[in-house]
Image (cartoon, rainbow, N blue to C red):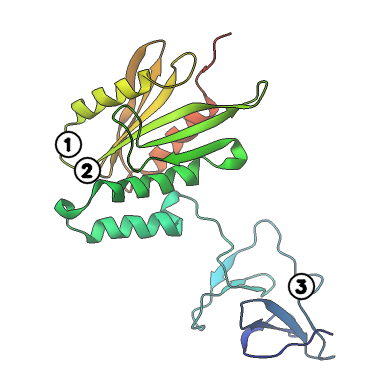
Amino acid sequence: MANYTGTSYDLGLLNGDIWRQWSDAIGMIYYQNLVTQETTYVLPTGYEDVAGDTWIRDPTKTWPQWNNQRTGRARLIDPTPPTTYLGDPFVMARSSALKRTPESEIPEHMYRRMMCGILQWIFTSNEGFSVFQETMSPEMHPDASVSRVLMRTGGSFYDFLLGETKVPGKSWETCADHLHTVCASCDNETKNVYGMLQIGFEVQFYKHENNQFEAMGDRMHLVNDVDDFIALTQHLKTHPMPVVDH
């Protein structure tokens, strides 16, 4: 039997009314058998989560708590991953800050931080991607870049996507021309790379392939067109550019 001291928080009963759930002062959940008074940090057998379980936030608690509707199991961190980047707490906070601030007072780096969070949500390291943000970059360097590991001798990094971020009011044509120059100067052997231009909340993708630079689809709004934005980025991931000469 474990020894529990200090402040504890009652998280409610597991279904069946045999086990009560508690949280200690540092947020570790433990379980008390109401028949034997046994206490343990190990989730009792039969209460494990399974695919398809539904989780509901408990409105009766003063702290964040989600309950499994099948087993009654409590969690203090939302177990349901967000279906879009708008559900990511960091992207949500940055987006909210932009909406609360008068447009004329928003510095460029605030838009860049939001975009960096979005790119990190989409292009994950376990898929072989790495997102870099440049805070003070030279003229011909992008504001953000997504690199991809190419499985060749040495496991080299190559540019997958180069992004530019600007505040609202900038000329789209002028910024696209600059992005073209940035893409044409990438480090890939073939100079093939995807590009992305963000002006405020609007964004458009491009591809620089075989020395040709062209837009991919229409401009999208990062909030209003979130599904279209994610769909296009998923298309990019499944259609990587040829970045090395054979």
Answer whether residue 18 is visible to the viewer in this image. Answer: no
Residue that appears at 30% across and 20% down = 181
* Image-based side of 193 in relation to 177, left or right: right
Of the numbered discs 3 and 2, the one sitting upstream in the chain is: 3
Question: What amino acid type is highlighted by mark number 3?
Answer: Leu
- Residue 137 on image: x %, y %: 33, 36
Residue that appears at 37% across and 60% down = 93
Q: Which mark is residue 167?
A: 2
- Residue 166 on image: x %, y %: 25, 39
Image quadrant assignment for residue 125: top right
Above/below status of 52 relative to 1: above
Residue that appears at 27% across and 45% down = 201
Q: Are marks 2 and 1 in contact (CB under 8 Å)?
A: yes
Question: What amino acid type is highlighted by mark number 1?
Answer: Lys
- Residue 105 on image: x %, y %: 17, 54
Mark 3 → mark 1, Cα distance in angstroms: 56 Å
